[in-house]
Image: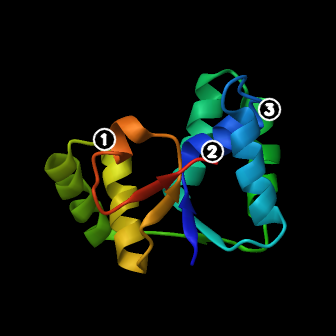
Amino acid sequence: MSRFVDTNVFIYSATNHPQFGENAKRILERIERGEEAVTSILVLCEVSWVLEAMGRQSDIKTTLEKILSYKTLKVVGFDADDLLVGANNMLLYGVDFNDGLNIATMTTIGIFEIYSNDYKHLGKIDFLKIIFE
């Protein structure tokens, strides 16, 4: 079974986060060794936006290249209908729009386990299993 990879996993790894970086790197190492996983175009955009906001524009291209190099990481898109479902999820679950859209994407492809440590927001979703180890 594939798991969805949330933005924070990529950011913690790319920035060597002092508290969460090692867990994030272990997750990505499993994927690099062949564990199947899924992420979204939106997540890749968020990674870029966060790095840009941190003043790390020069890291964006290499970070995206690294993420896209994982042969068993599938990157999925979304369509206009998913945007509306995402907006509905935002209201229904009390999460931000991007989380609502990622939940819509996950639901569409039948994935209910997510690599993330966003327990504050994604922990509100009873049908999602959050894994950060």
The kind of residue on which mark 3 rests is Ser
Residue assigned mark 2: 9
In the picture of the structure, the residue carrying the numbered disc 3 is 58
Camera sees residue 70: yes
Residue contact between numbered discs 1 and 2, judged by CB atoms under 8 Å: no
Q: In front of the other: label 3 or label 2?
A: 2
Task: Return the residue at label 1.
Answer: 96
Drawn side of residue 12 relative to residue 99, left or right: right
Secondary structure found at label 1: loop
**Residue 46 appears in which quarter of the rendering?**
top right
Taking the spot 35% from the left edge, 60% from the top edge, the residue there is 103
Image position of 94 (left or right of 54): left
Please rate how many residues cluster around mark 1, counting C-alpha atoms within 10 Å: few if below 14, some from 14 to 19, many from 20.
Answer: some
Mark number for residue 23?
none
Chain-order first, disc 1 or disc 2: 2
Say which of marks 1 and 2 sits in front. 2
Mark closer to the chain start, 3 or 2: 2
x, y percentage for residue 63?
77, 45
Estimate how packed mark 3 is, as few (under 14), some (14 to 19) or many (20 or more) residues with alpha carbons within 10 Å: few
Frontmost residue, 86 versus 124 = 124
